[in-house]
Structure formats: structure tokens, C-alpha cells
Amino acid sequence: MSWKKELIVNNEQYTYFDLSTIVANYQKKITDFPYSIRVLLESLARHQEITDLEKLIGFDSKKPTGVVPFRPSRVVLQDFTGVPAVVDLAAMRDAVVALGGDPKIINPEIPVTLVVDHSVQVDHAGTKESLSYNTEKEFERNHERYQFLKWAQQAFDNFDVVPPETGIIHQVNLEYLSDVILKDEENLLFPDSLEGTDSHTTMINGLGVLGWGVGGIEAEAAILGEASYFPTPEVIGVEVIGTLSPGATATDLALFLTELLRSEKVVGKFVEYFGSGYKNLSLSDRATIANMAPEYGATCGFCPIDEETLSYLRLTGRSEEQVDLVEAYAKQNQLFYDGTKTPCYTRVIHLDLSTVHSSLAGPKRPQDRILLAEVAENFQASLTKPNGPQGFGLAAAEIEREIVLENTKDSIETGDLVLAAITSCTNTSNPSVMVAAGLLAKKAVKLGLRVPKTIKTSLAPGSKIVTSYLEKGHLLEPLAELGFDIVGYGCTTCIGNSGPLEAEIETGLKESELVVSAVLSGNRNFEGRIHPLIKANYLASPPLVIAYALAGTIKKDLTKEPLATIDGKAIYLKDLWPAQEEVNAYINDFLDPKDFRDAYKNIYHSNERWNQIETSKGACYEWDDASTYIANPPFFTNLNQTIDETTLKDLAVLAKFGDTVTTDHISPAGNIGLQSPAGKYLKDHNIAYKDFNSFGSRRGNHEVMMRGTFGNIRIQNQLTPETTGGYTKLATGEELSIYDAAMVYQKKQIGTLILAGKDYGMGSSRDWAAKGTNLLGVKAVLAESYERIHRSNLVMMGVVPFEYLSGETAQTLGLTGIENYSFDFPSEPYINQVIDVTAQGKQTTHFKVKLRFDSEADIAYWKNQGILPLVIHKKIRKEQA
């Protein structure tokens, strides 16, 4: 029986792999499979991976086993993670030439789109000139990086760059890049799928497209034709019922789900939404909750295709022919959700939308949700809680502290806002919350409310469409009057590019270490991420960002206390909050498909500054040895060297961490400290402090990035409990920066180990968290558990991830971190093998750990020193065959 069927749409003939026929061949019904698994089944059938297809068809939804190879249809990159990925591709071309091969064998085998959205920084805010100033500074700072990307544009086939000032990668992906259903040159139809070098790639799940974030290393492998392997996932169904209560926003829903699903332990699992209430979620709301999948820990938050998907495609200017194709294929191939049959999920979690209420999350993690009425009380409690994810470890008197800013009459208190930002892919792309913010601002301005001048305010839309509908609805003006002028089209504050505060505020905070706050509509608020001097950071919907800016402090209960008093009259949040009917009317009046078509009609060439950048030509990049932005990385210098089990003997502990160490802790994206190892390196290369830029923008230079590894100012190494930041102790007791200590160990040819607690590597899909670990000479990590992406990245860089056995931790085993560790590692390891370990210190401790090689591919990566050397060897062999 043929698995291929024919489909005629608008008088054109297509073929497709028929899922019902495929699974019926194995006595199964396609309607029993979750929609996300159906996409994987189609991919396996199309790529003729029959053995894996049979395993997935026969998998036990309650206790899945084995691994799945995933070959995405395309890859999307943002510039912070995309530049180092392209640097690696350029370096691989050099390595191929050194081995006598043709450099052009290193070339994307599937479409790749890089969107420049992470580089703009909020240097200037609060005026109408902010956008042009910040853009000019962006191009000035990043000229070398952009020259490099322009070279890549001409050097590689299948590679496009969306220039700055267009929008955030995930919104551009949602509004323009994805066709939902693709066709090849032979008119074979198949679902769009992708991997992206940003954890929030999951936002595309809202459109019914399967995709997730990976590290740059894994993306490079996909670009070069390698499959990604991951354990066959549990699929957690989230049954949605009811509707959102008045006043509750999509942001509140996203924070509610983040808390709920974190507590339900969905890390590494697929989440799929369904139910009667699913139809009540707009596509933008679905994209908002799908975007937050990394925060609740899931691989994806899948929203199946339905009528709302088709309506969104029409709204965003897709052609009617494409909409017809999506509808016909999805319905014909059982990928269209109609609610008549619930698939077999591993388990089902129930979500009643009416139970969602106004909330914030903070002060340090997105999963720590706080009801709006409890925020002030929660902040006060956090001051005296032990220093950790939910506390600052301070005395009760801290709540009363106040400082006067030098050379001014202004003062700020504990809990005062110094930053309020409407930012990030999650929320600035959702019309319902953006219009609500505009309407709230309009009412506030009319009543005479103003934001205190000690607060830095900014607005960074997800795309130019946001500007279009806010402008047409006359909502940009009141936003600007409150200081929320447009500062750029990019991630800005959410990625740590918040820029400087006023000099007197920064001086005051450095001297006093006062706990002040930021409120932003971002998706992450990990320590040290938003701004190095702001310790309490809260996620909130765009209208609540404005409300807190007006209130000026996190210590007010906005459900009871007035935001301000004007002419003796108290103004409350309820006086400003727009009704949902008012918001919906604006959306209906001012969102137009023509605006989307106009915004994207010349997307790759619309930025004149970008068009004017000149670069080198040729297949191989001409490296500039003097560049502190782009450098040829040392990942391919020992391609013929072999790795064996002896590399895991007598390891010294470079650092010992507790729970919830994020990739921001391991590889910060923001500010480069003047006295940090990376700062000293730049200073030695005659770079002025004002031109340091950020770690994120310098990811194309390994010398900077390895010095920044474990360099977050808030990271806490248990070997140096009295010192916060990237420091450690040698066996001699000498305290050094982690980078300097790593260099001492490397000089002595001593391999090192990282000890960690739960959820090691949670957060962004940051490949430099693994690359930097590798370059510091770390051979292995031993943790209680890992976030999915970081574990993969470690393996792909040749760093071995181990996991304590259930019920065991460093504490239960009495491990202090001053021991030397030897792993009884076999020459032929197998998946999830249990390994014997000896820790030699004042006493000898023997224990067992689990090897977190989760697939045969992981073992192959280890044997080849990582995935990139493996790819080079394969390409050379194929060329020579």
C-alpha cells in the first residue's frame, strides 16, 4: 500500500504522506496520537527513517522509551547566538581546506534565516529621538559583526539575514517566515517545522508549527544535514476550559501556566493544548503561552491548527491560496483540531481560564508568580528570606532604607522602581496587551498622571506592525508622554540590553547596594540579567508595567492603594484599566492585513544602513586578528586527536553550585565588568570601557567569551561562600576568578569538574554556556538534573554530563568540592549507563552516577570530541567517496 496520496487544491495537484494510512499499516488509529507526535511521524515517513517510524508508532504514551531523530524543515537564528554559529561554519570551512577539501561542502542544506534583533541597546530612552539614537549606536558598535553577517549572506547558499529595525525573531517568524504547510519543488506537501537558536522559538507553536529552541551547536548540525536526537517525549495534554475573567490578560495566563506546569514537572516533555476553552484563545494568546514553554520547562507548547490559525494567516496578509493549502492539507492529513476526539496523552492537566487573575512574577524567577494584591507583601517578605531564588537575606530594617542621589534633591527607597520596560517577544507582539497598555496610558495622561523622573522607561515593539496599529489608534502619543517612547525593534531590556541608568542613580546603587526594582513585560528575570544594579525584577503585562511606573514603587498594593493623587483626588488602577470590549474594538478597527504585507514586502533590503555595509567576498572568511568581535575559534585544531576514558581521571572541582544555575549564570549576556577577566582582556586590547558593548554582542570572539564563562555577578560558588560572583578556590586555598583558576589547572594539565544541583542550565538556549565550559578545560558536569537544551549542548561540545542517582546529592554523599574525582568510564559507554565514581579528599567516597548520554548520537559526539568535528569528518569522507 502506498503511503503517498494526492490532494487537489485550487485546481493544482499535490502529493503528501498520508498519516492515517501509515499508522493503519501497524493497526493503529492516527486520532489516538497527539498532534505534535503526528508531525514527527510525518517527518520520519518523509525522510524514510522506517525503523524510527515504527518505534514511534508503537510507543507507549504513558511510558515512552527510545529516541526520535528530528530533521527540521528550516532553522532560524538570532544574532547573539547566530553570529557564533556562523563563525563556527566559517571556521569549519577553514578546517576543511586544511584537510584538503572544498570549503563549499560546508553549506546550509536547509533554509536558514537570521534575524538581527538582540543587538539594539537602550542607550537613550524617554524621547522621540531615542529610536534613531539607539539604532545609530547599534550600527556603530556592531559594525564588525554586521560586516561578518553580510559576508555570510554572499558566501552561503540557503542563508538569509533580516536586518535590524524589523522586529523580534519570533514575531517575524510568526507574522511572515512561516507558511505553516510547505511544499517542495515536486509539489510534495509537509508541515513546517524548525529549530531556532533561541529558547523562545516555541512561540511558533502557537501557529500549529512544531519547533523549539536549541543551542547554536545543535542548530549548526541541523543546518549541515544532521538529525537532532531527543528521548521519545511524554506528551502532557493541557485541557483548557472557560474564558479569561475581566481584567486578566494573556500575560497573566502565561505566568499562571509557568507556575502550574513547573510544579507539574514538565521539563523535557511536550505540552499540547486542547479542550473547549482552546477555541477561546486568540492566536496571539496561544503564541504568548507557547513562547513561555522554556519558562515552564517543556520542549514545546503545541497549539494545533484550527479555524483561528486560518484567521490569523489571513489577518497577517498571507495569500488566500496559502490559507486554502493549509486548511486542505491539515484537514486531509488529520492535523486540523476540531475537538471531536482527544488523543492519548501521557497525562492531562486541567486549566480553567476563569481562575487566572492579574499577577506578576519575581523577584528573580519567571515561575514565582505573585497575585497582584500580594506583590507588596511578597517583596517585603523577600528582603528577609534567605539569599536565594526568592530572597535577599537582609535585615528587616532594609525596607525603610532611603538614599539621596548626589548632586540632586531626589531620593530613592528600597523597592522603588528605577526601570520600567515594555519589551520582549512574549508580550509586545500581542495586540490585546499592547492596546490595553496604550489605553491605560491615554487615561493616565488625561488625568494628569506622570512617571517619576528617576524611572527609566522604554517601549520596544515586537514588530513594526505594533507601531502601525498604535499610531493609527492615536495611542503612541500618550505612551510617549509617560516616557514610553519607542527605543528600538528588538529584545532590549529582556535580554539585558537595558542600557545605563542615570549616572547619579548608578553611583547611588553601587555605593548603597539598595534593593530597587524593575518591572518589565519580558519573559525572564534571572539574577543579573535585566541590569546588574537592579536586584528585584518583576515580569508583568504591558499595562501593569505602566501602572507600576506611575506608582513608582513595588511596595504599593495596586488593588487598594492609589497610584497617585492629583489635586487631592486619589487615582486607582481600576480608574485606568480599559474594558476588554474597548480593547477588542481597537483591535478590530486598526489591525489590517495590508499593513502586514507592506511591512514585510521588502524585508531583506529595507534597511539602508544595512545595505550600505561593505564586506569581503569569497568562500572563506578573511579573519582580522585584531578584532575583538570576530575570531577564528579553536574548536577544530585537534581534529585527529582521540578522546578516551582517561580524560575523566583525577578531576579537580572548578566550581560547586546549588540549584537553579541558569545559562545566564554560566554565560552572561549583558554588561562586561571593567575589572572582570573579560574586561581586562578588552582593556589590554585598547578598548575603552564605553565601547565594551555586551557579552551577547561579543559571542563571535572566544577569548572574550571564555573569560566571561561563570562570570555572572550573582553566581554563587559554594567553594567561596563568602564571595558572590565568578570566583573559586584552588586546592591550595588561593581564591581566584574562575577563569584564572581554569588557566592554572590547564597549565598543570589537570582536568576539571563542575558540581551542581537541580535544573542545571535552565534558561536561554545559550551555546556559549557549553562552549565556554569546554574551553575552560571542564571535562564533565555532575548535577542532580539538567535543563534539556544545556545537557545537549554539553554533550555536543564533548563535555560529559553525569547525574546523581535518585535520592542522592552532593550533600547526602558528603561531597565538599575539595576532592579529586575519578570516573570509571568505559571505552564503549552506553545510554544512561551507571558509572562508578571515586572522590578522593580527606576521606575516600565511592558512589554511582548515571551517564546522561541519552542517545547513540551522544556517544558518537563524545568519541569525536563533539558534533562539529564529527560533521567535518563525515563531510570529508562523503566528498572523497
Image: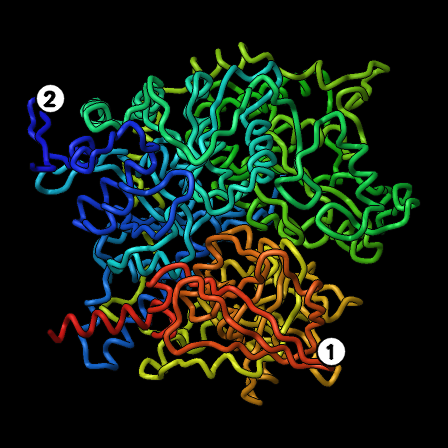
Is 667 displayed left or right of 721 in the figure? left
Residue at image position (54%, 88%) is 749
Q: Position of residue 519 (x, y in %)?
A: 67, 37
Q: Position of residue 366 (x, y in %)?
A: 62, 41
In this picture, is 727 found above or below 50?
below
Residue type beneath disc 1: Glu
Secondary structure of the residue carrying numbered label 2: loop
Quadrant of the rendered structure where residue 881 is? bottom left
User: Which image quadrant: the N terminus?
Assistant: top left
Task: Judge the density around disc 2: few (<14), some (14-19), many (≥20) Cα neighbours within 10 Å.
Answer: few
Of the residues under marks 1 and 2, which one precedes in the sequence? 2
Residue at image position (60%, 71%) is 847
Q: Which mark is residue 174?
A: none
Which residue is nearer to you in this view: 702 or 409?
702
Q: From the image, tell me which residue sits under label 2.
A: 10
Residue type beneath disc 2: Asn
In this picture, is 828 found above or below 405?
below
In this picture, is 73 found above or below 12?
below
Which residue is nearer to you in this view: 533 or 300?
300
Residue at image position (66%, 39%) is 368
Mark 1 to mark 2 CA distance (whole Å): 71 Å
Residue at image position (39%, 45%) is 64
- Tally the marks: 2
Which residue is nearer to you in this view: 475 or 632?
632
Task: Judge the density around disc 1: few (<14), some (14-19), many (≥20) Cα neighbours within 10 Å.
Answer: some
Which residue is nearer to you in this view: 151 or 741?
741
In this picture, is 121 found above or below 326?
below
Is 305 displayed left or right of 130 in the figure? left
Q: From the image, tell me which residue sits under label 1.
A: 735
